[in-house]
Amino acid sequence: MELPIITLTSIKTGQLLFITAPVDSGAVFLSFTSTGNLVECSMDDSRLQEAFTTAVKAREKAHAPYSGFKVGAALALKGTGKIYPGCNVENASYGGTICAERTAMVSAVAEQGTVPFEFCVVVTDTEFATPPCALCLQVFSEFCPPDFPIYLGTVKEGIQKKVLLKELLPIPFNAIPE
Ligand SMILES: [Zn+2]
């Protein structure tokens, strides 16, 4: 079997190292964080980088006086090329709090309707990347297929992990019987 010719092009983008490796007719984008964690990306790396930057900026706007835990999110839409920012907005009545992921989703739906989502990036300023809470995962399941990709990152380390919605929420609640 003939092995594919692999051309490696490394571009230092902040703390992310992107390597492009053409395989067959397509291209596979591989990114490594500074700690060596590998994330395999199937979309244009510049779009993922734009989403990460959007999430970092959105996080700075978070209203989190009660928890002190600021979260930023960026939701990329299919087709339109749009990326919607989200941040957590807490409330003195704690139940009124909304997470960054849901902020991004409701913002996108309010402007675009229920167009397909492509992927989401979630950024925290913690040592390890933090996944969405179960409530946000349930809302993702309303609009996204089970293999919807969610990229988890930190401000300092960049994107550290790619997970699929079905891995975090294998059996979502569904009020409509199959
Ligand atoms: Zn949440």
Image (tube, rainbow, N blue to C red):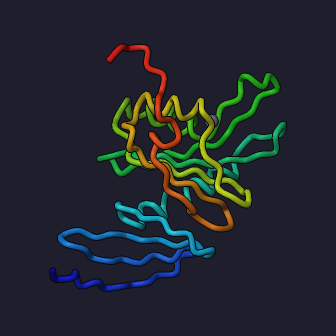
Q: Where is residue 106 drawn, in percent x and y?
A: 51, 31
| Residue 35, x across and y down, in percent | 63, 74
Q: For this rendering, which residue is in front, 106 or 6?
A: 6
Does residue 98 appear in this view?
yes
Question: Which quarter of the image is occupied by the C terminus?
Answer: top left
> From where the camera sits, is residue 15 visible?
no
Look at the picture and state if 92 lies above or below 152. above
Q: Is residue 16 above or below residue 168?
A: below
Pick whichever, 43 or 147, lies toward us: 147
| Foreground pick, 81 / 28 | 28
Residue 97, percent from left and from top: 71, 29
The correct choice, above or below, for 111 with respect to 131 in the image is above
Q: Residue at x 77, y 46 (%)?
A: 69
- Ligand 1 image position (quadrant): top right
In which quadrant of the rendered view does residue 24 lie?
bottom left
Q: Residue furthest left?
A: 1
Q: Residue at x 27, y 76 (%)?
A: 22
Q: Nearer the viewer, residue 149 or 75?
A: 149
> In the image, what residue occupies the spot 42% across and 65% down?
40
Q: Horizontal placement of 173 versus 99: left or right?
A: left
Name the residue furthest front: 1
